[in-house]
Image (cartoon, helix red, strand yellow):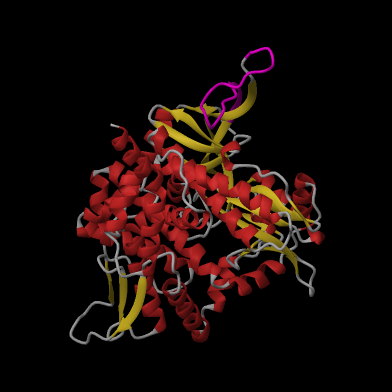
Amino acid sequence: MSTKLDLTEINNRLEKNLEDLFKNDRFQNMLDVMASGHHYSINNVLLIAAQKPEATMVRGFKQWQALGRHVNKGEKSIDILVPSFKKVEVQKINEQTGEILRDANGDPQSEVRQSISGFVMGKVFDVSQTDGKDIPSVRDFIQEDLKSADSLTELYQRFVDSINHNQQAPLHIREEAHTAEGYGGYYNRQSEEIVINTAVSKTTEQKFSVLIHEYAHSQLHHKENDMKDLPRGHKEAQAECVAYIVSQYYGLDTSLSSTGYIASWAKDLDLAKQAIKEVQTVSQHTIEKVNSLQSEKINEFYQSINPEQVKSALEEKHQISLTDNPTLQLLDAKNGLVIYATVEQNERDQQFVLRTNTNRFVPLNEVGERYPVLNVLENKGQLVKEYTKVEDLLKVTKIEDGKYAVTLEGGESSQRTFTKKAEGQQFLQKTALAQSLNTDRFLSRSTHKEATQLQQVNAAHLNERIGAVLKVKNNHAQHQHNVTLGWHLLKHPQIQSKDELQQHISGLNPNQSHTKEMGAAFKQLIAPEKTAYKQNELER
């Protein structure tokens, strides 16, 4: 591994790589790397695409050895960016008051933490450059299954049903035949509808591809998103890039007709980087959502992999035995979400996997790396008595002037970067809110007698976190109303005050039950403030 790199040198190299991709008509190579299904950072996507665009899985020399494979003689390595860390001593802060914590003598308390100190260039190799033990690919497994028309039809219908039956989101999908029109479908931003034109999109594969494209529009360009007013060509290019990545991942027919507009991004590399980041985020979200609808099949795939080494490491780190079927609370630090999952063991082959509360399966080898464990919620029939809060694990770290990263305790990067520290702090608020809601969901389904007391503790956390997001002091809303507000704030992280929330609610369809619930929750949220205001007026 080489010495620490200068940040200016890194940025210059990345910009040159991006320029070369545009100039040499190789932008599609970058999308292919994104479609590999691996969670590379956007900067490493650029580096990999520039050096080995056909790469699907990269690891270091020793990492391949640990997986039972060896790098073939004469293979040229791929350069990627790897963060380096240093230990720093920082003063402990009371997160509620912002005051410095002091010991019995009144001296400031301190602790040693790791923070990103820079980057070095790591040397890695693609799986195609190695030989040895087979590394099964869930992507290959899914592609083979979707060659069946019945499997693709079933997946398409599950996707549609999952959207239409989601009460937390207003989006709705329907099919209509518009014989006089030439479009395959469209997204209506005002009514939050996706319409699939069955007169043009006749086969399941055609309908699925159109649905992915329009779903990308609904995630990127809805009426509350700042990108809704960008030029039409820019929005179409983004949606087509997402559709290309997702279709390529699932082995469907791909096309990229907005190449003319994409080429225009080369004139503004900052705009291009932002557009690509958004494409990567939405395409990964879409793939994860679609994969969650195939949880049973993917579980069969993972059951064929021997995770004994991962199992032992997980048990040792958290002092648990997977045979006790513990329930773990997992942090998706990249997306700012929290889930819980129970360990299950297949009776046929005795392999372990985690079933999430959304009925999705997480393989053991993704626990800790992709999904760090926040808490062991339940083990050996006992509930946890104290929770580790995400505020104690995640920190906003300055990595260069004008750039901040969200890092996990111990220095692991969550690959989230922001141009303002306040944006990173908002991300942490969102994650903390997600933890409260996830914990509430877990406890509400628990039959343990201790659950009631823990629910009260968690309700207080949720109350404080909603108050912090909306900048409302003394939030006295009832718990169920806080839950309603919390889920809505997760879906709309741009809402950062009670005034913005009120304006947002006024723009919703007043006839929908969810809007009425939001209105009632908001009234209760601000009721104490209004009461205090009236009392002050009377005193005057």
Residue found at the very far left of the displayed protein: 180
Measuring 38% from the left and 35% from the top, which residue is drawn there?
A: 419
Left or right: residue 412 versus residue 419 is right
Figure quadrant of residue 306: bottom right
- Return the x and y of residue 522 as percentages of the image width and height: 38, 53
- Magenta stretch: includes residue 253: no
- Return the x and y of residue 495 as percentages of the image width and height: 36, 48
Residue 44 visible here: no
Measuring 58% from the left and 45% from the top, which residue is drawn there?
A: 124
Q: Quadrant of the N terminus?
A: top right
- Return the x and y of residue 89 as percentages of the image width and height: 61, 21
Q: Report the label total.
A: 0
Measuring 33% from the left and 35% from the top, which residue is drawn there?
A: 536
Reply above or below: 177 against 246: below
Residue 63 visible here: yes
Q: Quadrant of the C terminus?
A: top left
Nearer to me, 246 or 54: 246
Residue found at the very far front of the displayed protein: 539
Nearer to me, 4 or 479: 479
Left or right: residue 337 versus residue 215 is right
Nearer to me, 535 or 409: 535
Question: What segment carries the magenta color?
Answer: 85-107
Figure quadrant of residue 327: bottom right
- Return the x and y of residue 409 as percentages of the image width and height: 61, 36
Predominant secondary structure, magenta span = loop
Reply above or below: 26 against 391: below
- Magenta stretch: includes residue 90: yes
Figure quadrant of residue 43: top left
Measuring 49% from the left and 69% from the top, which residue is drawn there?
A: 290
